[in-house]
Image (tube, rainbow, N blue to C red):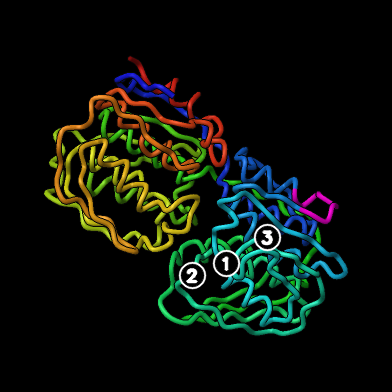
């Protein structure tokens, strides 16, 4: 995708599809309890793959690159008594660890085998009834592992108690899951490092759930507003969001002077740049609770040549690609020299951008979309642009309506 040097149009309005994170959680609950009616479902490839898998009666289920589907379905198929499922995915998916989740499910009594490499997909899952009520899980692992267990907990005869050991990663995503469970009529509590979910015994009447639009998708437009200094309107978002990535509003207000105004009756947010905003000398931020928007922030900071030091990014190493390494490589093309550790990225200095910039995406949708706003600074090419289908299929169409060359 060739993006010429562009300018931002004033007052463009964009409707963003439902949150992938919320949609995927609701699809599992809908399949387990049959009492949820979902509105504004995400049109992302990940969500469509999960929806297809849940209606698939064949023994082998291939979820391709959909990491959320892999994690959620591992627990889901574990409690499908009498059903055997081979759960597999792409080459990259077979390199993404799933051992912590499998260990927790085995501790509960699930029957799961590794078909190739220990600790990694593909998995052979023999569904059975689970009677144990308590499990211990390291708190630093992906929140999706914990959410995977929480989504099946209400279906277990005796519920489930999860004891998290150590420092909790991405707590906001866990709290989002618990909020969804509550709205679905499944009682739960989160006290200290212990999460308790009661077995579902509530009303089986239908519950309508309108999915809020995706805040991580909104993050790219915050970047455009920060670099282009024009007003952008986005739908459908709520002031009291449970999505951890809604932190983007506070982050971009503090560091880039982008105010967010909510219009409640329209479920609209307006991103409005502050005139004559004084940018900070340095951005120092722990993004442990919102790591998925770190790439967007790093590109924005690099484009404005604001030094940054971002921590809490350990989970980025095992996403669609090693996102920290990918950022290290691609930010160089924008003129930003960085250093990375297992959980941090920090700028070392800024040079002139390359003349001909071509951004590798590493089969990672967020690499494509987070680097796109740099077209307000300089012409660039985004390789394998179709990767955006994973979370935001309409991204390039929406972007075209936002820009003028």
Q: Nearer the viewer, mark 3 or mark 1?
A: 3
Which residue was labeled with disc 2?
A: 141
Q: Is residue 63 left or right of residue 338?
A: right
Q: Would you identify the image quadrant in which residue 301 lies?
A: top left
Disc 1 crowd, CA 10 A, few/some/many (<14, 14-19, 20+): many
Which residue was labeled with disc 1?
A: 145
Identify the element where label 1 is drawn.
helix
Marks 3/1: CA distance? 16 Å
Identify the element where label 3 is drawn.
loop
Image quadrant holding the N terminus, namely top left
Who is closer to the viewer here, 30 or 125?
125
Identify the element where label 2 is drawn.
loop
Is the C-beta separation of discs 3 and 2 under 8 Å?
no
Regarding residue 302, the answer to whether it shows in the image is yes
Q: Which residues are magenta?
A: 53-60
Image quadrant holding the C terminus, namely top left
Which residue was labeled with disc 3?
A: 122
Q: Is residue 284 left or right of residue 402?
A: left
């Amino acid at each position: 995708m060739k993006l010429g040097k562009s300018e931002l149009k004033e007052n463009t309005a964009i409707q963003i599809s439902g949150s992938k994170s919320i949609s995927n959680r609701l699809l599992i609950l809908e399949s387990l309890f049959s009492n949820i009616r979902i509105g504004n479902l995400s049109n992302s490839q990940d969500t469509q793959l999960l929806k297809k898998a849940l209606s698939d009666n064949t023994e082998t289920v291939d979820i391709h690159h959909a990491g959320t589907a892999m994690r959620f379905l591992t627990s889901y198929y574990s409690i499908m008594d009498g059903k055997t499922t081979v759960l597999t995915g792409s080459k990259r998916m077979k390199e993404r660890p799933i051992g912590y989740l499998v260990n927790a499910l085995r501790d509960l009594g699930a029957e799961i085998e590794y078909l190739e490499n220990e600790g990694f997909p593909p998995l052979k899952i023999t569904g059975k009834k689970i009677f144990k009520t308590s499990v211990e899980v390291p708190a630093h692992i992906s929140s999706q592992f914990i959410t995977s267990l929480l989504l099946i907990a209400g279906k277990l005869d005796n519920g489930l108690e999860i004891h998290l050991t150590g420092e909790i990663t991405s707590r906001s995503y866990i709290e989002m899951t618990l909020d969804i469970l509550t709205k679905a009529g499944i009682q739960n509590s989160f006290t200290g490092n212990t999460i308790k979910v009661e077995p579902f015994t509530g009303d089986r009447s239908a519950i309508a759930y309108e999915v809020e639009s995706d805040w991580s998708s909104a993050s790219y437009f915050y970047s455009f507003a920060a670099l282009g200094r024009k007003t952008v309107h986005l739908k459908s978002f709520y002031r009291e969001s449970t999505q951890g990535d809604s932190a983007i509003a506070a982050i971009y207000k503090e560091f880039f002077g982008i105010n967010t105004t909510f219009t409640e009756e329209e479920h609209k947010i307006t991103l409005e740049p502050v005139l004559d905003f004084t940018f900070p000398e340095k951005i120092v931020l722990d993004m442990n609770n919102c790591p998925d928007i770190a790439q967007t922030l790093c590109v924005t900071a690099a484009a404005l040549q604001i030094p940054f030091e971002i921590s809490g990014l350990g989970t980025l190493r095992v996403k669609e690609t090693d996102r920290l390494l990918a950022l290290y490589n691609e930010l160089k093309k924008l003129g930003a020299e960085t250093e990375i550790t297992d959980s941090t990225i920090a700028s070392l200095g800024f040079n002139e951008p390359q003349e001909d910039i071509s951004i590798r995406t590493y089969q990672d949708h967020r690499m494509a979309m987070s680097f796109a706003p740099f077209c307000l600074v300089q012409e660039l090419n985004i390789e394998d642009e179709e990767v955006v289908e994973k979370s935001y299929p309409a991204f390039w169409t929406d972007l075209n309506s936002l820009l003028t060359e």
